[in-house]
Amino acid sequence: MLLTVSDVLNPDQVAKARQVLDAADWVDGRVTAGPQSAQAKDNAQIPEGHPAAREVGGMILDLLGRNALFLAAALPLRVFPPLFNRYSGGQSFGTHVDNAIRQIPGTPHRVRTDISATLFLAGPEDYDGGELVVQDTYGTHNVKLRAGSLVLYPATSLHHVTPVTRGTRLCSFFWIQSMIRDDGQRSLLFDLDVGIQRLNRELPGHGSIVPFTGVYHNLLRQWAEM
């Protein structure tokens, strides 16, 4: 499932994030790439654990923890601390697949990367190129969102970032280990959840709401890994 979560950050929050990140130290983005990805990766990145990354990443995670659409779609168990990258001057990231397991620096904890997330901190008007291109069983999807919006997609997908030919593309990226490992099961639960919420809005008190809610939770109980 590929899903856009719009306006995770409002314009003031985007401006604050950019102010903090612009003042940070940036390094070659290949520091967090595996051996294969490093051959395709050409961007700049804020080091993991940098105070700016912790500050802006903490704000992002706090907002996502209160975002109903994100929670319904991702069903998060663990979230890798957000990282930050930027592309300019023709930089790009060739076709790759994300590492299956990520170690959280400074901890014994690992995250299985079920879902990849990219949060755009620069809008389409700020740069040319820089599309996130995701390939899945339904075809090829080009993603370039307004600042503050997020895209979720299966971490198993092949994807790349096209060259940035004008301006600067600034994003946060991270991974989610979901309570539901299987993307198909996660999509079914999301569709059922959205349908229940719509029924609640349009026909409050309808007799079908409780049985459908029961089906949702019984499937979640059957499939969830904790």
Image (spheres, rainbow, N blue to C red):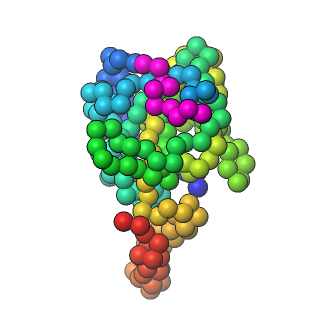
Residue at x 33%, y 19% (from the top left corner):
24
* Membership of 214 in magenta stretch: no
Q: State how many labels appear.
A: 0
| Percent x, y of residue 180 | 47, 64
* Membership of 30 in magenta stretch: yes
Residue at x 52%, y 34% (from the top left corner):
34
Q: Is residue 130 visible?
A: no
Asked if residue 58 is positioned above or below residue 53 in the image, the reply reads: below
Question: In which quadrant will I find the N terminus?
Answer: bottom right
Name the magenta segment's main secondary structure.
Answer: helix
Residue at x 37%, y 26% (from the top left corner):
47
Q: Is residue 41 visible?
A: yes
Q: Quadrant of residue 166?
A: top right
| Percent x, y of residue 53 | 33, 30
Q: Which residues are magenta?
A: 27-36
Question: Considering depth in this image, is 94 or 117 the residue closer to the camera?
Answer: 94
Residue at x 47%, y 72% (from the top left corner):
223
Asked if residue 67 is positioned above or below residue 204 in the image, the reply reads: above
Question: In which quadrant will I find the C terminus?
Answer: bottom left
Relative to 79, 119 lies left or right:
right
Asked if residue 156 is positioned above or below residue 132 in the image, the reply reads: below
| Percent x, y of residue 218 | 43, 79
| Percent x, y of residue 219 | 47, 76
**Please, which residue is most extreme toward the top here?**
89
Asked if residue 127 is positioned above or below residue 171 in the image, the reply reads: above
**Please, which residue is most extreme toward the right here?**
139
